């Protein structure tokens, strides 16, 4: 009966002296049952090696740490494997699974009653962590196995020959011995490796003591960092992380200026690291930090922006009101805006919850067509369609200009028609009302005549102010229908067919000439794409008979209103833009 580690070792026939070598740990009922199943299924007592362990882990993906540690200890006793040799093995191609296995090896090492490591062992562990695991937590775990005598040997070796793969082991070793502060204070090295160590040491200290790291950074690091060194990306990546973590607590202009100096040529991976660093703190950042972060976000590619949209949105959604108003439009213009706002659109969600904080700046940006005004239009449309704002919040004297700008820069028929009618109904000044009336009947109607007519007709039933408007649209529609019946405006079917045939023949000849001149003309066989409503398939059955199958092709379509005159009359489109840019309110 398996109930603890000692009983398992007896079950697999390990000698009794093993019992005193490792700490005994009990198993839960589920763990004991699982170990029994593993013994029976994989015959562990007969043959067990690293390949066996890898095979088990591939099939049994939910083994607890307690079970894995027991299997690792069993493997160490059963084979010639040491903890170090296992640490250098790759259990899985998956990085997470590989790192999890390395953590379990450290857990296994903790189970030994007495573990002796050498300087050479430590060097190999650190090299493996640096090259494969890339997780500083491993250095912290490893440092717990280093006694004082061994640590002195490691320090002497490091002093004479600093190596970056040993940096964090030295840092955590000094931390455990309460000697890191004095070491950093007295540190005088100027080489690349020594500067990198000082940056990483300050970063670790900053997690608990920002003031000390801030002072060391200003007094020592700013003058030490060589921005033109050979391995600039490695040094600047670590340095940028340190500067930002210090800026989070203290909006220091000196630190901000240093960030701006190094931010122009940093890699996207370093920017991503900084964004996740700031995001992980889940706190409100100051104005200087927001500016510095924005300056590096603007350097990201569209692919990276898409990947980092949520953490960026989260960081800037937490800003104080005055800073939020300053940065919300620039950030939205970078990460994009989606009308179907969900929980991931934190900036837009905050605007929706309290539109008043941004409304004045939003209207000013849009009406004056300042930087990011196109985003301002989209935000106004979003808030308007979700009924978070209404025309009552706008100044009457801005009605026409706002409508012009929305009409010119936002192709959304439903929104344009709705806001046109809404503005018209809520204007009190007769002269402004006349201007709106004329503009809607000329420009809006020319682009969205059917939709505008249907909306006015429906609303006029309950709104007397729209009766005159509705009658005018009905008259225009009648004229439009009569014009369609006038044969002078309509070519004959015969003429249309002749035109299409000639056009098809002309295109065929153009394509033939283009094919002959192409360098690929003789390299590939020609294929003809057939068009129709049905598709035919042939296949031969097991009896050798040829079968023919004919299927109807499916049809998919989508209909949406488009700005007819803007598309068909480019001059009208350009004139509208020119009038807006000149600030005119009249045609």
Image (cartoon, rainbow, N blue to C red):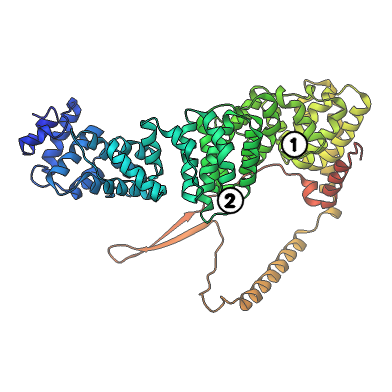
Instruction: Identify the residue at image location x=47%, y=28%.
Output: 208
Residue 451: which disc? 1
- Which quadrant does the C terminus fall into? top right
Instruction: Identify the residue at image location x=28%, y=63%.
Output: 542
In terms of secondary structure, where does tag 2 sit? loop
Would you place residue 513 above or below residue 4 in this image?
Answer: below
Residue where numbered disc 2 is placed: 227
- Which quadrant does the N terminus fall into? top left
Residue 224, image x and y in percent?
56, 46
In this rendering, does residue 471 appear at all? yes
Residue 46: image quadrant is top left
Residue 166: image quadrant is top left
Which of 79/258 is in front? 258
Labels 2 and 1 touching (C-beta < 8 A): no
In terms of secondary structure, where does tag 1 sit? helix
Instruction: Identify the residue at image location x=85%, y=30%.
Output: 398
Residue 43, image x and y in percent?
10, 43
Quick check: 267 left or right of 363? left
10 Å neighbourhood of mark 1: few (<14), some, or many (≥20)? some
Residue 169, image x and y in percent?
37, 40
Residue 178, image x and y in percent?
39, 30
Which of 197/432 is in front? 197
In this rendering, does residue 91 appear at all? no
Quick check: 275 left or right of 433? left
């Amino acid at each position: 009966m398996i109930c603890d580690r000692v009983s398992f070792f007896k079950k697999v026939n390990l000698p009794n002296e093993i019992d005193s070598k490792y700490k005994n740990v009990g198993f839960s009922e589920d763990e004991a049952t699982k170990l029994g199943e593993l013994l029976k299924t994989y015959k562990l007592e007969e043959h067990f090696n690293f390949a066996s362990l890898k095979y088990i882990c591939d099939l049994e993906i939910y083994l607890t740490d307690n079970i894995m540690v027991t299997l690792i200890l069993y493997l160490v006793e059963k084979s010639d494997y040491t903890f170090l040799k296992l640490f250098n093995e790759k259990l899985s191609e998956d990085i997470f699974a590989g790192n999890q296995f390395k953590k379990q090896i450290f857990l296994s090492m903790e189970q030994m009653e007495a573990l002796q490591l050498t300087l050479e062992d430590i060097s190999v562990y650190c090299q493996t962590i640096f090259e494969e695991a890339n997780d500083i937590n491993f250095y912290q775990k490893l440092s717990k196995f280093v006694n004082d005598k061994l640590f002195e040997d490691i320090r002497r070796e490091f002093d004479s020959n600093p190596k970056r793969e040993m940096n964090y082991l030295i840092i955590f070793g000094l931390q455990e011995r309460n000697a890191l502060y004095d070491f950093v204070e007295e540190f005088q090295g100027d080489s690349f490796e020594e500067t990198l160590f000082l940056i990483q040491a300050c970063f670790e200290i900053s997690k608990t003591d920002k003031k000390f790291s801030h002072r060391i950074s200003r007094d020592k690091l700013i003058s030490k960092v060589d921005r033109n060194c050979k391995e600039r990306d490695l040094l600047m990546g670590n340095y940028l992380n340190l500067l930002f973590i210090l800026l989070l607590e203290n909006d220091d202009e000196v630190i901000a200026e240093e960030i701006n100096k190094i931010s122009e040529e940093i890699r996207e991976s370093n920017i991503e690291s900084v964004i996740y660093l700031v995001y992980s703190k889940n706190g409100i950042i100051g104005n200087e930090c927001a500016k510095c972060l924005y300056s590096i976000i603007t350097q990201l590619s569209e692919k990276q922006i898409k990947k980092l949209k949520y953490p960026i949105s989260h960081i800037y959604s937490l800003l104080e009101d005055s800073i939020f108003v300053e940065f919300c439009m620039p950030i939205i213009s970078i990460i994009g805006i989606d009308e179907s706002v969900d929980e991931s659109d934190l900036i837009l969600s905050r605007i929706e919850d309290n539109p008043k904080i941004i409304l004045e700046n939003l209207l000013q940006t849009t009406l004056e067509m300042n930087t990011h005004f196109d985003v301002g239009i989209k935000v106004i449309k979003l808030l308007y369609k979700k009924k978070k704002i209404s025309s009552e919040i706008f100044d009457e004297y801005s009605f026409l200009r706002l409508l012009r700008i929305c009409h010119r820069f936002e192709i959304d028929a439903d929104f344009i028609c709705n806001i046109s009618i809404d503005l018209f109904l809520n204007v009190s000044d007769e002269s402004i009302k006349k201007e709106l009336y004329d503009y809607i009947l000329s420009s809006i109607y020319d682009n969205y005549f059917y939709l505008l007519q249907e909306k006015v007709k429906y609303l006029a039933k309950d709104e007397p102010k729209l009766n005159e408007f509705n009658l005018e649209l009905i008259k225009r529609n009648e004229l439009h229908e009569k014009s369609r019946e006038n044969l002078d405006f309509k070519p004959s079917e015969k003429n249309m067919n002749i035109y299409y045939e000639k056009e098809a023949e002309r295109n065929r000849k153009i394509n033939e000439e283009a094919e002959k001149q192409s360098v690929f003309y003789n390299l590939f066989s020609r294929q003809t794409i057939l068009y129709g409503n049905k598709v035919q398939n042939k296949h031969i059955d097991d009896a050798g008979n040829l079968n023919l199958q004919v299927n109807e092709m499916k049809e998919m379509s989508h209909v949406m209103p488009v700005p007819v005159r803007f598309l068909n009359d480019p001059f009208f489109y350009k004139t509208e833009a020119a009038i807006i840019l000149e600030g005119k309110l009249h045609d």
